[in-house]
Image (cartoon, rainbow, N blue to C red):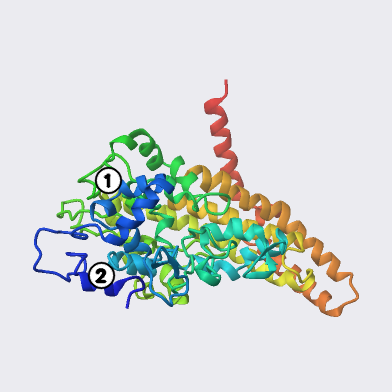
Amino acid sequence: MYRRCTSRIIASGILIGVLGLVPAVRAQAWGLPEMSDETRACVKCHMTENTPIYQQWGASKHYRANVGCFECHGAQEGEPDAFQHEGHWIATIVSPKDCARCHAREAEEFANSHHSKGGRILGSLDNVLAEVVEGNRGLVTPSFQNGISAAAVNGCWQCHGSEVKVLPGGKLDPATWPNTGIGRINPDGSEGSCSACHSRHSFSAEQARHPDNCGKCHMGPDHPQLEIYYESKHGIAFRAHKDKLNMDSAKWVVGEDYHLAPTCATCHMSATPARPATKDRPETPGMPVTHDVGMRISWNNRPVISVRPEISDAKMGLPGANVNWQTRRNNMKNVCINCHEQQWVDNFYVQYDGLIDLYHVKFARPGQELYNLAKPLMEPAKFANALDWTWFELWHHEGRRARHGASMMGPDYTHWHGTYEIAKHFYIKMIPELRELIERGRHSNDATKVAAADVLEAKLNEVLSSTDHRWYLNQSDPAELEERQRRQAEFKSRYSD
């Protein structure tokens, strides 16, 4: 049933307390009674050949449980990536399916998460950029005889994961390995990489709990969660108190084992205590650790238009399709309430939802409609038009930054890196580019383009005449203008010399 040396494990009656194979043995609570002969043989060589790896493993809980090289890397003849080494069948990659032999619940939760599906980006619009616009087919390997883009291999694939290609003899194609992308597609058919967060060979929980661990992927112009976190009050508290957060504790429950600051793991993954009801707060159920990071998120802010997470889970065929956003939001509120009172938590979500609504109504929906109407007037190749770049960055970079900034209470990213950039580029780039396309289409000899230009112009006029945009045409409501001028005069009188 499992991929590596399962028959050996069952026959030996080991992993006591985890697989429940030997209930008669009482003294061994977890792991193996002793180190296996196979692992001893591995260690004898690798402790000198790969000393840092040996030291990392030696400091790990795996070592203390007698789980070693062979227990993780042992394979069976006939497996796609198995090869003979010193008289044993082994494989380089340790996949989630392998880890599931001991960490079944964690592996199942991870497999049901968006993290494990990160490799499915390989056919997305982002990869058109990395493979075509930025890249070429200059990197030739045994599995990619026609070449592959080094920009995709070294960029996209290292975070999202690649499909690992196996060469004869169990070796791995260099375009796809090394790779610890979170959604790596493994030779055994499993998706994901546990070592993306639990770096081998120490597999430290302390490291996985550190915000910088998430920052390998969650940073940069299109999803700067790490930068937003460090800007927020949460991140400021973490930097001030990071040595007092007990992050190497086996049990790490907010309010019990630490209380001075949260990390990414605190809010999205870690355990919370049960709390009795008070006059200001209902009873709060405790939550266990989860490896499905979507179970506490009530908006998916990746698309042009934010969607509820159960909708995106349904598209991926994940069981989260049956968990509505209200349940997920309550899960997150059960985290927040450990440090904040109920009104604070509830009001935060009013602010967050308000920003999502603003982005949708004022920019995302009209922008998407205008962009789609402009396509008949544009060059057909993606990113061959200025408007392609403007619209892509407006939603994919600036729109995400604003939404993520609001979700994590990073005001600078919400405003200056977010809504300010959205507005600036909508008005000074997108609208002029749309007008240029309209003018060009109207003066073409193609009746289809003339008609498309008329439709686009009508929609553009409709958008700009709306309440949200009419200021651009100098048609603001007189009463609103008067009120704004009154407030400006009041401000100047208060702060003028």
Dot 2 amino acid type:
Ile
The answer to whether 445 is drawn above or below residue 349 in the figure is below
Residue placed most toward the observer, 404 or 209: 209
Residue 9's disc number:
2
Expressed as whole percent of the image width and height from the top left, the position of residue 74 reads 36, 66
Instruction: State the image coordinates of residue 415 (x, y, percent, origin top left).
Output: 54, 46
Front-lying residue, 385 or 270: 270
Residue shown at 43%/75% (left/top)?
79
Tag 2 and tag 1, C-beta contact below 8 Å: no
Residue at the top extreme of this rendering: 497
**Residue 205 image point, x, y percent:** 32, 50
Amino acid under disc 1: Cys
In this picture, residue 105 sits left or right of residue 167: left
Residue tagged 1: 339
Rendered-image quadrant of the N terminus:
bottom left
Q: Position of residue 36 (x, y in %)?
A: 26, 60
Label 1: how many Cα within 10 Å (few below 14, some 14–19, many 20+): some
Q: Total label count? A: 2
